[in-house]
Amino acid sequence: GEAHVAWVLEGRAVQDVFINPRRSERGPDSPRFANWFGTTLRIYDPTIQAWRVNWFNPRDGVRAELIGRRRGNQIVQEGKFPDGTPIRWTFSEITNNSCLWRGERLEPNGRTWGLQVEFRGRRTA
């Protein structure tokens, strides 16, 4: 996939456009699973000392609201899908040029986090 990330709103927010599969690989027969062309807006809220995160995928109408905080060397965003399913997005192995992003959802047993997606991001020119 590909992600385009930038500071927006006069430097008050971070927005990404996440495309999977990458545009060069997309077509009318692309599978629906893991087929995203969405955007995330992250705005820091000093009243809770955390980032309010909103993700939208207009292709299939999925959206999510999360709260993001630093935990040690990671950034963890926790929230729910509209159906109430708890989700967690974790950014780890963060360097100036790369990171590992894992998206998980809480399984129905209420104890086990199941991996939905995992991406290794790499900065390009």
Image (cartoon, rainbow, N blue to C red):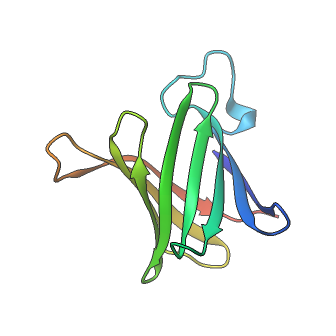
Q: Is residue 11 left or right of residue 49?
A: right
Total marks shown come to 0
Q: Quadrant of the N terminus?
A: top right
Q: Quadrant of the C terminus?
A: bottom right
Q: Is residue 22 above or below residue 70?
A: above
In the picture as drawn, the residue positioned furthest to the bottom comes out as 72
Q: Residue 29 or 74: which is nearer the viewer?
A: 74
Residue 114 position in % (x across, y down): 28, 48
Q: Residue at x 75, y 34 (%)?
A: 24
Q: Is residue 23 above or below residue 55?
A: above
Q: Is residue 6 above or below residue 71?
A: above
Residue 27 position in % (x across, y down): 69, 21
Residue 16 position in % (x across, y down): 70, 53
Residue 6 position in % (x across, y down): 78, 61
Residue 15 appears anywhere in the view = yes
In the picture as drawn, the residue positioned furthest to the front comes out as 47
Q: Is residue 86 left or right of residue 53?
A: left
Q: Residue 31 or 49: which is nearer the viewer?
A: 49
In the picture as drawn, the residue positioned furthest to the right comes out as 10
Q: Residue at x 42, y 40 (%)?
A: 81
Q: Residue at x 22, y 43 (%)?
A: 107
Q: Residue at x 67, y 78 (%)?
A: 96
Q: Residue 36 or 76: which is nearer the viewer?
A: 76
Give the quadrant of residue 59: top right
Residue 92 appears anywhere in the view = no
